[in-house]
Image (cartoon, rainbow, N blue to C red):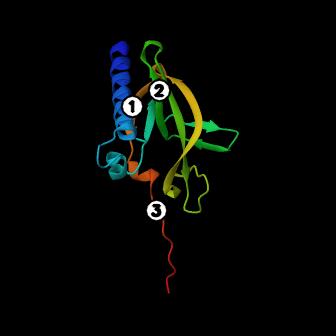
Amino acid sequence: MLDEQQNRLCEVLQEILHFQNLIEHTRTKHFNHLLLKIIGSDTIPIALLTRRGTHLQLTDYESGFATCYFRIENIDAARNLVTVSLLCPMSIEREPTTQSEEMVTLEKTDKRATVSTTTLSGVRLLSTSLLSANVFIESKW
């Protein structure tokens, strides 16, 4: 049963990575990166669920932020490993935040981590608009 779940999870992660690569690398003769322009981001943001049913949270101690939002970079299905880059949740003040209700956008980082898929039970897709959110603050008067 566990092996079947692992295989399905790896298949799902590989499918997400495949579509992410399509978005990033597909070019048309007349419109160049039209798919990327339509979607607005080359990243499909995800949250990973642990076997305990909680969101996997990783911390970048160097930059001082914690996140449960990721971008898939690579999958090694033979070794049950997924490499992700950390997406930093940002508040309206453009500061990293750990409070989901304060998050208005996600920022891509170059920080990566490799996670064993044996510690995971699922994946949750998030809206790509979180990576390209424009925040406008206007005066009341």
Q: Quadrant of the N terminus?
A: top left
Is 38 situated left or right of 56 in this image?
Answer: left
Query: Residue 113 appears in which quarter of the rendering?
Result: top right
Q: Position of residue 115 (x, y in %)?
A: 52, 25
Label 3: state its secondary structure: loop
Mark 1 vs 2: CB contact within 8 A: yes
Residues marked 3 and 1 touching at CB (< 8 Å): no
- How far is disc 2 from disc 3 in space, using C-alphas? 29 Å
- Please give the name of the residue rendered at 43% of the width and 12% of the height, measured from the top-left corner: 78
Residue at which label 2 appears: 74
Could you tell me how many numbered marks the image carries?
Answer: 3
The circle drawn on residue 17 is: 1
SS of the residue under disc 1:
helix
The three-letter amino acid code for the residue at tag 3 is: Asn
Type of amino acid at the residue the image marks with label 2? Asn
Nearer to us in this view, 48 or 128: 128
**Residue 6 placement: quadrant:** top left
